[in-house]
Image (tube, rainbow, N blue to C red):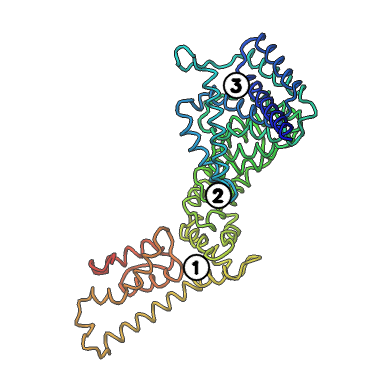
Amino acid sequence: MKLRNQMGACKIDQQSLLDYGLSVALDAIWFLRTKQDLEGLNGLIAKIVASGAKDFARAILRTSLLASCVAACQSKAISVGDSKEIVADRLHDRLRDCPGADHLKIEAGVKVEKFMEWALQCIHMHHCSEETQRYRWNCNTLQEVQLHLSAFRAFLDIAGDNLSGKIFTEAFDAACFPLTLFSSLFEPGWSSGSSAVSIKGLLSLLVEGGADNVNQCFLEAARFGSTELVRILLEIAYQNSLGVDIDLALVYASHYCKLDTMACLVDEGNPSSLLGPLIKAAERGSLQVVHWFVGRGVSEIEMCLALTTAASSGHFDVASYLLEQIPQQILEALSTQILKAACGQGSGSLEGVAFLLRSNFLGDATATYDAADLIARGATNGEPPDLVAFLKEHWSQVAFAEGVNAGEAHFVNVMRVLRRGTSPVCLDALPSQMVLGIAYLPLYRACVSEVGGQLLPQRLRGELVEAMSRLGELTGAESQGKDLVMTLERHMPAFLVGS
């Protein structure tokens, strides 16, 4: 029994050695230089398999990741010397944006980091002179790339049915991972070089074998801004008649502000519409991305939709920018629809409407007030009740008249206190400017709180017009907010202004 156990252990050890030898031999594929090396390596792999090696899954996963790391090094995306720090930083950033529990991310990060360090050490071993210990690197020629791909295809032929579609899918993911990880470090145009030819050939062979996650890797590459990989996967998808979701990829790229990737998707992927990602960018308040889409020539209607989205989401810097881009005649034609759309959903959404009105979004005070009044009077279709109530109270002609009436009542009350008040501190004994300050400081502060816009709500404007008439200023019902506030300020005591 003891002898039988020892023989079994030896058999297990022999199996492990054969499987490990297969992986090591397969790793050497990506460092072949001559046809003679190719023939020798093919023979070695065939002998190892014939001797009983059978862990084809581990071998193809490992070599796929290694091939990608070789391409990354050749692109000057990373150097072996400082690779450990780069790998750690990139993994942290990458895993932070991935779903899942934190402890699982940590565990996955440790495993992947060790695997990446092994790959880079392997590259160092193959490209470091034993005599001088000096690192040397030359990009593979196209002829050498063909040797690599020929050797990999020969391995696939030997493996045959031992590799399932699931294994090819996992290998495809392993090959894409480093290219996504180091996406921002690649040199422009890398996807047209010999290293990219190697990766393109590897990925194409994996697709032929049954990998079915091209779209998933494509979306992830777009999300992390790996423009060169996006370009390669687009080409592979077209060559193999595979469907990739260009529109969703553009949403991902714009969400993370990957402008180069967005340009690639638009120019080479031909998305069906730019509206979706534009709206998402406006909703997030990403001014840089919105600016990019406007530069790409989105339509005026699409800009209007983005405007209302930005306003209803409280991103007023984006809304201000879009107001400058939309022709005035378009804003005028869609004025009430824009105000209703800016109402948005949820609490606080009326702030977007108030912003547009304060900004005088139609460029003409009378037109802006009239648009608000139309909705307040129910003269349009489908007015949200909360919007109607808000505009009626603050921005309608009725609100203006109520403001004038409130101003008159306030003046009467002040005069009553001034003439009939029984307080020991008599108002008529104070300087006139002090009395004005007491009478109109609340109104002044209410107007100042509306800073940031060109127009005041009609209710406040009515009170201001009434106040100006009592102060002897020649103002009409058409007078606007800013000039009225400045006039009132001139009558206020200096020590109260801005208090």
Q: Is residue 94 visible?
A: yes
Q: Residue at x 67, y 9 (%)?
A: 35
Image location of residue 351, percent across then percent down: 50, 62
Nearer the observer, 104 or 425: 104
| Pair 3/1: label in front | 3
Mark 1 or mark 3, which is nearer the start of the sequence? 3
Considering the image in quadrants, where does the C terminus appear?
A: bottom left
Q: Position of residue 29 (x, y in %)?
A: 64, 19
2 vs 3, front mark: 2
**Which sits in the foreground, 243 or 322?**
243
- Which residue was labeled with disc 3? 195
Cα separation between marks 2 and 1: 54 Å
Label 3, label 1: how far apart the Cα atoms are: 64 Å
Q: Which mark is residue 103?
A: 2
* Figure check: 108 above or below 37: below
SS at mark 2 in the image: helix
Q: Is there any visible trace of residue 267 in the rendered image?
A: no
Residue 11 location, quadrant = top right
**CA neighbours of label 1 inside 10 A, class few (<14), some (14 to 19), many (20+):** many
**Secondary structure state at the residue bearing disc 1:** loop
**Three-letter residue code for mark 3:** Ser
Q: Is residue 182 left or right of residue 232?
A: left
Residue type, numbered disc 1: Trp
The residue at 49%/73% (across/down) is: 399
Compared to residue 254, the image places residue 126 above or below, namely: above
Give the residue type at disc 2: His
Disc 3 element:
helix
> What mark, if any, has residue 395 been given in the picture?
1
Residue lying furthest right:
161
